[in-house]
Structure formats: C-alpha cells, structure tokens
Amino acid sequence: MAATDTPAAPASTRQARTGWYLYDWAQSAFSTTVITVFLGPFLTTITELAAGCELGADECDGRVHPLGITVAAGSYFAYLVSLSVLLTVFVLPVMGAVADRVPRKKPLLAGAAFTGAGATVAMAFVTGERYLLGGALFLIANIAFGAAVVVYHSFLPRLAGPDDRDRVSSRGWALGYLGGGVLLLLNLGVVQALSVDGDHQRTLDLARWCIVSAGVWWAAFTLLPLRWLREHPPAAAQSAAGGNVLTDGFRQLGRTVRQMRAYPLTLFFLGAYLIYNDGIQTVIALASQFGSEELKLGQTVLIMTILIVQFLAFGGALLLGALAGRIGARKTILLSLALWLAVMLGAFWLPAGEPVPFMLLGAAIGLVLGGSQALSRSLFSQLIPDGKEGEYYGFYEISDKGTSWLGPLAFGLVFQLTNSYRIGIVSLVVFFVVGGVLLALVPIRRAIVAVGNTPPRVL
C-alpha cells in the first residue's frame, strides 16, 4: 500500500477492542499495587531486616551481600528493577519476534501473564529475611509482565486505523489506571481496617497480602481478554509452521535488527522514548520508596496519593488523547514532558512529614502520566512496518510500565553515594530534558511514510 492511499479499516469488533482494554485493567494491578506502592517499601524492609536493622527503625545504613556483592539495603530494590530490565533486553525482543510468527498470539499472552501472576502470588512466601527470594520472584514477575505487554501491544494496529489509534490507545490506558485504582482502593480499605499503630510486623504482613491480591486480580481478569480478543494470523506464520518457533524467532530477530537500520527515524524515536520513559518508569517504581524513606510518610498516605494518581490518570489519559486529536500526538507528548520536568523539580523541595504537598504533586503526575504513555504507544505503532508489530514492541517494551534501568541505576548510585533520596529524585531531570529534545527533533510525518504507513490527518 502506498503511503498516500487510504488504509482499510482493520477487521476488529467492539468486543475485541473491549477485550484489549480489559487486559490493561488486569495487568495494571501489578504495576500499581506491586511496583508503585507496596513492593518497594516491603522488599526494602525485608532487606533491612537481613542487614541487621530493627523492624520500624527510622534510619538504616545496613548492607546485604547478594552473590558476594555489597549493596546498601535502601538501594536493593532500585538495583533489582535495573537488573530486571537488563534481562528483558534479551527476552522481550525474542518474545516479539515469536509473536509475529505464530498463528495464535493469545496462548503467548496467557503463558506470560499467568507466569507473572503466579510469581506475584508466590510473594506470600517472602517472610522474615528472605530478601533473595523476594528479589527472584520480582525478576520473574517483572520479566513476564513485560513479555505479556509486548504481545498485548502487538494487537493495537489490528484494532484501529491511523486516525483512531490515539483514541483507542488512550481508552485502554485509561481503563488500566481505573482498574489499578479500584484494587488499590480495596487494599487501602483493608490496610486501614486491619493495621495497628506501632505494629510494624502487621503492616509488613498486610503489604505482603496486598501484593498477593494483585497477582490474583491479574490472573482472574486476564481470562476475559483471552476469550474476546481475535486472532490475526500473520503471513510469516506459514513459514514458521514447519520449524521450531523459538529458534525461528531468534533468527527473525537477527534479521529485524539488521532491517531496522533501514528505518533510522523509527530508531531515533525509539531512542527518545526509551530515555524519557525511563525517567517516567523510575518515578513510578520509586515514588513510594521516596515517600516512605525520605518524606517519612505513612503507608496510608502513600496509598491515598497513588489513588489520586490512578483516578486522575484515567481522566488525564482521555483528556490528552482528545488534545492529541486537535494538535497531534507528538506535540501533546512534549507538553506532558514539560509538566514532568516541573514535577521533578517540585519533588526536590517537598517537606518531610507533610502529606498535602505530596498529594498535590501526585495529582499533577496523574494528569500527565496516562496520556504521555498512551500517546507514545499509539505514535510508535505508526512507525512500525506492517507485520513487525511484536518485534518492534519487543524493543519498545524494554522501557515501559515498570521496566526501566538507567533511571533506577542512577537513582541507586546517587543514593549510595549521597545517602539522599532527594538528590536521587532530582537526578532524573536529565531523562526528561534529553528525551524531550530528541523527540522534538523527529520528523514524524516523514518517519511514518518511510515505513510504508499512512500518516493520520493530525500530527
């Protein structure tokens, strides 16, 4: 199809699109309840216990030694997030290549989603000083989470045409934030009803079971997308029918890496996205740890703030999606990055022990969070050659929902050198500045035409 042709509407149904939206509802329980709220403080506390610190201590300068490496207890979770992304560099692109070659994607989605949900449920066994078990389960869950999202993203180009993709992507992301918020609201009710002031062990136990609830939610609601999504077998599936799909996937991945050089503008956009989204994902993953360890805010305040973020992100995703229909996705993303920059600078000056400023900052994050991510996803879908969605989203997902590595690595190193979470959080400013500048330099219309796609009317 020539770039100037009018593309045919994808063969999709409302039920298929609803099923696609509902997977975001299912998986967001993991990124919200686990990554954003509970796991950072929970695993940090388990690690501090292993380092010899007392439960509930205000300060802990202890060290643990996983595999003989000396690690500050406060840096352990940040390093785990970074390590999980380094591992996904090898897993996710291969998953994408396999997804593009198999005749049925839904079994891949099911396998990855249920593996991640199972590892999350297994956090019930992370008790006492078992920080290594907690770290291993997190690595499995986070890698499986990313692998499932690669397959999930690859359905998008088959669900909507160029002019509707921003809207469909924004709806999916908005429903995801709503689903994550609903489970978090339920968990907040449980924490408030069962927690006892001064009983740090009970608080730790409640956090553990809230994490487990996210795994159950993730697995249960994945059943609906698996029923309603429609398969769209690729042409490449015929060539893969007689061979081993996994080894063929590795071979195809090698070909794709070589072929990607023919689309330098797509690679340029991907580089910009990986940088600015690394900053976004680091904020998501470490905000709860920053609030509890640096600002000395209680778990209830943290959960209420994340609830504010979740429900405002639902509206924010729809609002920015509508704005993108007027001024284009790229300009809307750049506007959101400017707001992210202001948020990071504001976080440095937040007073300790004061919940209201922290909540107001969370409200600002909520307004830009969902839209910046949803529009990045839909914009990237315009820059992918037809039939290569899984492979390209495999690289894209290296820095998406909870998976980033440069940001957590920088945060962890800065904390280990300065013992200050404030300096660590402000170090993330560079990701938004550099990523935004690179995105502004991408000629989006030319990039879309270069891969053989038809640009939307508004860019």
Image (spheres, grey):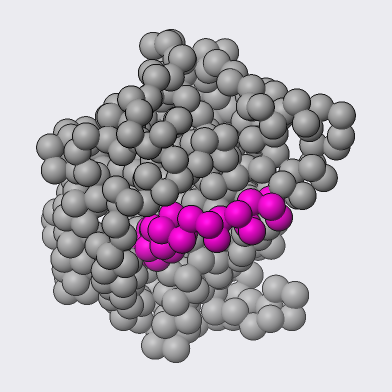
Q: Is residue 212 left or right of residue 334?
A: right
Of residues 114 and 14, the one drawn nearer to the viewer in this rendering: 14
**Residue drawn at (46%, 51%) of the image:** 400
Please, is residue 422 above or below residue 167 in the view? below
Please, is residue 245 above or below residue 299 in the view? above
Of residues 286 and 13, the one drawn nearer to the viewer in this rendering: 13
* Placement of the N terminus among the 4 image quadrants: top left
Number of numbered discs visible in the structure rendering: 0
**Residue drawn at (69%, 62%) of the image:** 132
Please, is residue 144 above or below residue 160 in the view? below
**Residue drawn at (44%, 88%) of the image:** 417
Of residues 448 and 110, the one drawn nearer to the viewer in this rendering: 448
Query: Does the image show residue 16?
Result: yes
Overall secondary structure of the magenta section: helix
Residue numbers of the magenta segment: 253-279
* Placement of the C terminus among the 4 image quadrants: top left
Residue 53 inside the magenta-drawn segment: no
Locate residue 149, reporting x and y percent.
53, 39
Q: Is residue 61 left or right of residue 196?
A: right
